[in-house]
Amino acid sequence: MTIKRRTSRLLHVGSVPVGADSPITVQSMTTTKTADVDATLAQTYALSGAGADIVRITCNDVAAAQGLAEIVPRAPVPIIADIHFQYRLALAAIEAGVAGLRLNPGNIRKEEHIKAVARAASDAGIPIRVGVNAGSLDKDLLAKYGAPVPEALVESALHEIGYLEDVGFDDIKISVKHSHVPSMVESYRLLAKRIDYPLHLGVTEAGPPPGGLIKSVAGIATLLLEGIGDTIRFSLTADPVEEAKAGRKLLEYLGLRERKSLDLIACPSCGRAEVDVIEVVAEAEAALEAEGLPIQVAVMGCVVNGPGEAREADIGIAAGRGKGHLFIKGQVVRVVQESEMVEALVSEARRLVDEGVEARLAAADVSAADLAEEQAVELRSLQGDANRAAERRAAVAEAAGE
Ligand code: SF4
């Protein structure tokens, strides 16, 4: 499936392009005090390592702006300053060398202040995100609409953009975040029809995982699949590293970014499982994450259905009677003792990444496939065919009148 992206303008946050055909980017935000330069830099590195392309840092006082002056040149990714209420801090952040600003139209109200920031950003050649948030909507708009409905969020964004455009500033991206997923989706859909600036997607105040993850994925993925969105942020009440990881993984799972991390697929387990699937998956995940291998790995609880159902995976393991059946692209290449199955999986995964599929299939144990089939037949005879194929075929034939 190819996603047809909405046509948007291109801008740059430092070295990272946003909008048009550029890859959809992941953002996250530090939770440290910005004035604590070492802690903020350490977290910025952690976020970058977890998949963040751009990191936002609050600039809430002069000490924070001074901290930014030290952080920006040492950060591994472009830094955006988050500004609330005090437009002078936006000017200070620009002086500190940030690659972008985020302004909240709900709390920088004076037109001349917004325009002063736009002129300084224009001189510095950096973009501004107009970050509308349902929770801090302009009071007049709240009074007009009675609630932070999608139309109110869009009006707030357009109003703010007007101030920026008045001084010839169009290096703009926009977000209209809402904590209510259907309202968030509708706000972006409405906005996408009105302007062609890049859009930054997010469900605001999504809360802790798993609820926060579910809300964020529901809102962000819905829009991305419609081609709406150029950069994303998961707003989780959790270690921000989790936000960056989740954002990156979502883009990889949607096929919007190349796979850089592990994609672990596993059966949900059932009464046929020959091992404790949850335990084996946890063990395999920890070992594979530590290796940092960018492949799809399957862990299946039994050989009756496992290798077939997971044939699309790069590599996988299925439990037999006291054995682990290691398969590559659905073909069994080795049968190992159950106690060694995770170790064998990790070592084969490593070799698969280094040597490629063809080489590892060529190095397969020729007797493994036969041994695996023997075990699968044995299990089927003990447990019955999971799909009750013979029984179902007979029922179909009977229904057809044969
Ligand atoms: S692979 Fe086997 S254990 Fe896992 S859900 Fe399917 S039948 Fe059950």
Image (cartoon, helix red, strand yellow):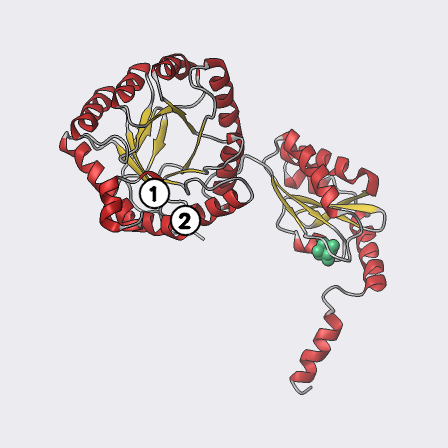
| Residue 30 spot, x, y in % from top left | 46, 26
The dot on residue 82 is none
Residue with the mark numbered 1: 134
Residue 155 seen in the figure: no
Residue in view at x 73 percent, y 70 percent: 389
Position above or below: 121 against 286: above
Residue type pointed to by label 2 = His
Whether residue 73 sits left or right of residue 369 in the image: it is left
Whether residue 92 sits left or right of residue 288 in the image: it is left
Along the line of sight, the residue nearer the viewer: 399 or 42: 42
Graded by Cα atoms within 10 Å as few (under 14), some (14 to 19) or many (20 or more), the crowding at tag 1 reads: many
Ligand 1: image quarter: bottom right
Along the line of sight, the residue nearer the viewer: 300 or 235: 235
Q: Which corner quadrant of the image does residue 131 belong to?
A: top left
Position above or below: 11 against 90: below
Q: Tell me the CA gap for discs 1 and 2.
A: 9 Å
Residue type pointed to by label 1 = Ala
Most distant residue in the bottom direction: 401
Position above or below: 231 against 190: above
Secondary structure under tag 2 reads loop
Along the line of sight, the residue nearer the viewer: 155 or 283: 155
Q: Which corner quadrant of the image does residue 363 belong to?
A: top right
Along the line of sight, the residue nearer the viewer: 69 or 324: 69
Residue 100 seen in the figure: yes
| Residue 12 spot, x, y in % from top left | 32, 29
Q: Which corner quadrant of the image does residue 294 belong to?
A: top right
Report whether the residue tagged 2 is closer than 8 Å to ligand 1: no
Secondary structure under tag 1 reads helix
The dot on residue 180 is 2
Residue in view at x 22 percent, y 24 percent: 117
| Residue 264 spot, x, y in % from top left | 63, 43
